[in-house]
Image (cartoon, coloured by chain):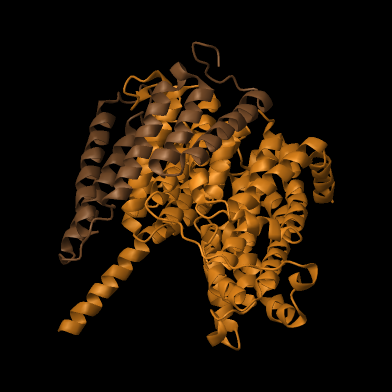
Chain colours: A orange, B brown
Amino acid sequence: MEIFHNILMGFGVALSWQNLLFCLIGTIYGTLIGVLPGIGPVVGVSILIPVTFGLNATTAIITMAGVYYGAMYGGSTTSILINVPGESASVVTCLDGYALAKKGRAAPALAMAALASFFAATLAVVLLTFIAPPLANLALSFGPPEYFALAFMGLTLVTSLAGESMVKGLMSGIFGLIVSCVGVDAVSGEERFTFGFLSLLDGAGFVSVAVGLFAVSEVLCNLEESMEQVFIKVKFSLRSLFPNLQDWKDSFWPIIRSSFMAFFLGNLPGAGATIASFLAYGMEKKLSKHPEKFGTGVMEGVAAPEAANNAAAGGSMVPLLALGIPSSGTSAVLLGALLVHGLRPGPLLFQSSPEFVWGLIASMYIANIMLLILNLPLVGLWASLLRVPYKILMPLIVTISAVGVFTTDNNIFDMWVMFVFGIIGYLMRKLKFPAAPVVLALVLGPMVERTLRQSLTISHGSVFIFFTRPISAVLVVIALASLFAPLLRGVMDWRKKVVEIS
Amino acid sequence: MRRADQITGVIVLIFSLAVIEGARRMPPSGTFGPGAGFLPFWLGAALAILSIVLLVNASREPAQASDRSPFPRGGPVLAILEAVGGLAAFILLLETLGFLLSIALLTAFLLRVVEREPWLTSVIVAVANAAGLYVIFQMLLGVSLPKNFFGF
């Protein structure tokens, strides 16, 4: 079996002492990011891009993938102990997690969260191992129209699902595409929107934009809110840590169902870990024999969403690696990181850099084991970290962001880009414009433009080229449907109103 | 959000018209196929339409007395302006003051002035932060950080 041969080679790469060390650093840092409220995986990974710039690409991406997973594990800790989600994918965990903690069952809830995460994340890597290579093979036959359709679908799905208003989501996405046009046009060599700044010839700089939009704006938003925390004290002993038999019975099937559901959901563009965790919770509540108990502290209310957010994080690696299409904010930042390191994810990656792809996949197996150890026996340590006040943390985030952005190119100008996008990001948050579509569009922008222009050149300007090829036709139709579905719903509502009035 | 959305709609509309104008000035493709201004033009057009939709949707909502600005007032505004100003000053002075000094000053400023932490905490964290970042970036990652006139 070729896959087993490949995965063995991957372990050969991942088990080098340097990769092991950085995998460990990534998972520790990721758990920290997950535990601390106010900074999530997107911020954590964007800050890390410049820091890992000097490492070789494989090690750098292994570190960042570890951060992504670590944040998914760590997020539950704050949800359970202080009723504040450590990151957005752990919001639903608060409902039953905090209720369990108030009942004095915080320790088993934390342990169940870690075990559910481990099961789900491992399952996701196994599925990834078997699904990504054939998908990449299929994608080898894609031409420019298919790639345009794929990127177009990814963009429309993400933008139409992000945030409360679809109009605002689309505006964010288009803004990101406009920002991606900044710099020298790759086809004609023409300068676009550079306003005479030499530093803008290469574009606005992905790292500066992402760090500004996520990290700086996050800090500015948090300055308005005082972070009052009610901390539930827990005694951690190995005996009290383990969930009892009833907990296992309650959580076993929810974990399995949520993991599978969330993995495939994570494959789709637009449905990230947060949506998966909400859906898993809702699904388990529907299927439960005692739905009324949800919210009062049931173990499956912690197990299902925690399994789901890890499985979805793993699932989002499939389109990222096999197609080069990120499916969420965090995977968009990961794609940006890959590009910074000169790797272009997509079907060719499996052929041109097998040691990278399989090294990364193998490292995910290892990262999960590390995370289980970090989160199960050491959970008390992380809980005590919550006592570090956010006020001390804020200046650290600002300074690391600024220095990190500076070091990508040793250029002061990049810090101004970060500064401007920090303010834009703050305004966007306040006005309820989602930030993830901007970054996604910025990453996909060059590919969207190149494939669109290539396709139109092939077809002598006719857009029907996207509808006459079967794969691109299906993708474009899905994309258009996602754009116009709310419109149809609006028409239906309006008709209902007319009927009611008459 | 009604008033806020109306204002946003107008600002984004102006922005998108500027993008369209910028795209129109880009030369057409020298060979065949779409040129440099092709995508920006259509993006600007789409953004203009969406901003009009936002404007119309917001204006159709009934005006409510409780329609408050999403932005904070009073103390938090000052804190945000101070933080933004401090960051701008940091970027301006980085190459003059050097890495260590400017990082320490920015950290102390954010803690003492923006967050009103005690002097002692501010100074200790500032020094530790500057030293820590120096070790990570300059010594471990081998980045050459900006130095001041005196060489630090």
Residue at coordinates 39% horizontally, 45% vertically from top-left?
Answer: A220
Residue A496 drawn above or below residue A259: below
Can you tell which quarter of the image residue B93 is in? top left
Q: Please give the count of numbered marks on the rendered protein.
A: 0
Residue A341 place in picture, x, y as percent: 61, 31
Residue B12 drawn above or below residue A328: above
Residue A357 drawn above or below residue A181: below
Please tell me which residue lies in front, A76 or A204. Answer: A76
Residue at coordinates 65% horizontally, 71% vertically from top-left?
Answer: A106
Residue A10 place in picture, x, y as percent: 79, 43
> Is residue B148 in view?
yes
Residue A352 place in picture, x, y as percent: 70, 34
Task: Classify the position of the C terminus of chain A by image quarter.
Answer: bottom left
Residue at coordinates 35% horizontally, 24% vertically from top-left?
Answer: A194
Residue A206 relative to residue B61: left or right: right
Residue at coordinates 39% horizontally, 55% vertically from top-left?
Answer: A225
Residue A164 relative to residue B134: left or right: left
Residue A118 drawn above or below residue A139: below
Please tell me which residue lies in front, A255 or A101. Answer: A101
Residue B136 relative to residue A248: left or right: left
Please tell me which residue lies in front, A42 or A403. Answer: A403
Residue A186 place in picture, x, y as percent: 45, 26
Can you tell which quarter of the image residue A296 is in? bottom right
